[in-house]
Amino acid sequence: MLYVGLDVHMSQSSLCILNQAGQTVNRRTIKGAGNAVIAELKALTEPFSLCYEASCGYGYLYDHIRPLAVHVAVAHPGKLRLIYRSKRKNDRFDAGKLAKLLLLEMVPQVYVPKLDVRNWRSLILWRQRLVDKAVICKNQIRAALRECGIASAAKKSLWTRASVAWLSSQELGVAGTLKVQMALDELLMHNKRINQVTRELRKIADAHPGVALLRTIPGVGAHTAQAFCAWVDDPARFARNKQIGAYFGLVPCQDASAGKNRLGHITREGPAVMRKLLTEATWVAVARDAHFKMFFERVMGQKPDRKKIALVATAHHLCRVMLSMLQTGEPYRKEERKCGRGEGNPIRPQAVPSAPPTPTPPPSDFPSSLPADARGHGGVA
C-alpha cells in the first residue's frame, strides 16, 4: 500500500508518495491541471490511498480519483495547523505532510457529497450572491434619495411598480438621476436572474421529500429548508443530534484548562448562508410558535442584552429539531396552547399529574337507604 499526498493547483501540483514504513518512494512536481494529475495516478502499479486539501474544484478531482484509489481523504484546510502555521511552507513540504497524516490516519476529513448535491449547493450560493447584489442596488437608491433630502412616499415597499414610477419622476439632479436609473436597471436585472435561479431550485426542492417535511415548522420557508437538506445531505452521518450545531458553526469557542472553562463567540464554521437563513427563520419561529418562544425567553432570562445570545441558541435548537425530523420522518407538531411562565419548559417538561383515585364501590350488603336519623343531614344529636 502506498500513501500519496497531493498539493493541487491549477498550473502545477506536488506529489509525495510514502510506503508503509513511512519512507519516501517518489516526490515530484506535475505540470498541468487536474487531468495531468489523474494521468500520473493511473500510472501507479500498486494500490494507494490519497489525501489532498479541499479547495475550489475538489469535487471534480474526487470523482475522478475515487475509482483509482483504495481510499481518498479530502482534508479540511482550516484544521491542518501542521501546514498553515508552519514556518517553512511550500508545495513539496505540504504534499509530504499530507502523506504523513494519511499514513498515521490523522487527516481531518470533510464530507464529499455527490455531484447533484454539489450542484444544488452551488445554485443556493449563487442565488444568495444575486440577492446580496440586489440589496446593494437598493441601498444605493436609498442613499441617493437621502442625499437630496427626499423621503420615500411608499408606505410599505419602495420597489413596487408604482414606487418605481415615483422614483423615476423625482428631480435628483444630473448625478442623482443617473445613479438611481442605473441602480434601478441593475436591480431589475438581478431580480430577473434571482427568479430564474429560484425556478430551478424549486424543481429540485419539489423532488426532495425532506424540504416539504421541514416546511411544517413555523418560520422555515422553502429556501431555508432546501439549504438545510442540501448541506446535511445524509442525516445518518451525524451520530448525535448535537453535532449539527457544530457543523453549522453555532456552538461557542471553548478554552478549557486546569478546571477553568471559557466560552467565547460562535465558531462560524460551515456555510455562512446557512447561519443567515437559520437566523431569519428563528425570528419568525419565535413569533409564531409557543415552543420556540419559550426556549428563546428562557435563555434570554428577561435581560435585553442577552437577546442575540438567545437568538443564536434558539437557532441551534431549531437546526437540531430539523435534523431530528429528517432522521425520523415525522412532521413538526405545533404546540397550540399558550404557556405561562414556568410552564411547558422544553428542556425540563412538567410532570403529568396522576389521575384521581377511583372510588371504591360499597359492599353488596350495604343498605341503599338509611333511616332519617342516621343520614347525618343535620339535626341535634
Image: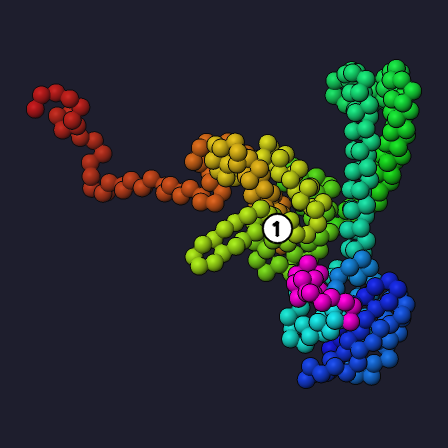
Residue count near mark 1 (Cα–Cα under 10 Å), binned few <14, some 14–19, many ≥20: some
At 77% from the left edge and 67% from the top edge, which residue is drawn?
A: 90
Q: Nearer the viewer, residue 117 or 122?
A: 122
Name the outermost residue toward the left: 381
- Residue 313 image offset from top left, x and y in percent: 56, 43
Q: Tell me if I can see residue 72 in this picture.
A: no
User: Can you say which quadrant of the picture contains the N terminus?
Assistant: bottom right
Q: Nearer the viewer, residue 246 or 256?
A: 256
At 70% from the left edge and 71% from the top edge, which residue is drawn?
A: 97
- Residue 127 image offset from top left, x and y in percent: 80, 42
Residue type marked 1: Thr
In-image side of 237 versus 156 (left or right):
left
Q: Which residue is mark 1?
A: 267
Considering only vertical position in the picture, is 183 above or below 237?
above
Indicate the quadrant where residue 72 lies. Answer: bottom right
Considering only vertical position in the picture, is 292 above or below 25?
above
Q: Nearer the viewer, residue 181 or 121?
A: 181
Indicate the quadrant where residue 3 lies. Answer: bottom right
- Residue 22 image offset from top left, x and y in percent: 69, 81
Name the secondary structure under disc 1: loop
Colour logic? rainbow
Q: Which residues are magenta?
A: 73-92
At 87% from the left edge and 22% from the top edge, which residue is drawn?
A: 176
User: Can you say which quadrant of the picture contains the C terminus?
Assistant: top left
In-image side of 41 versus 306 (left or right):
right
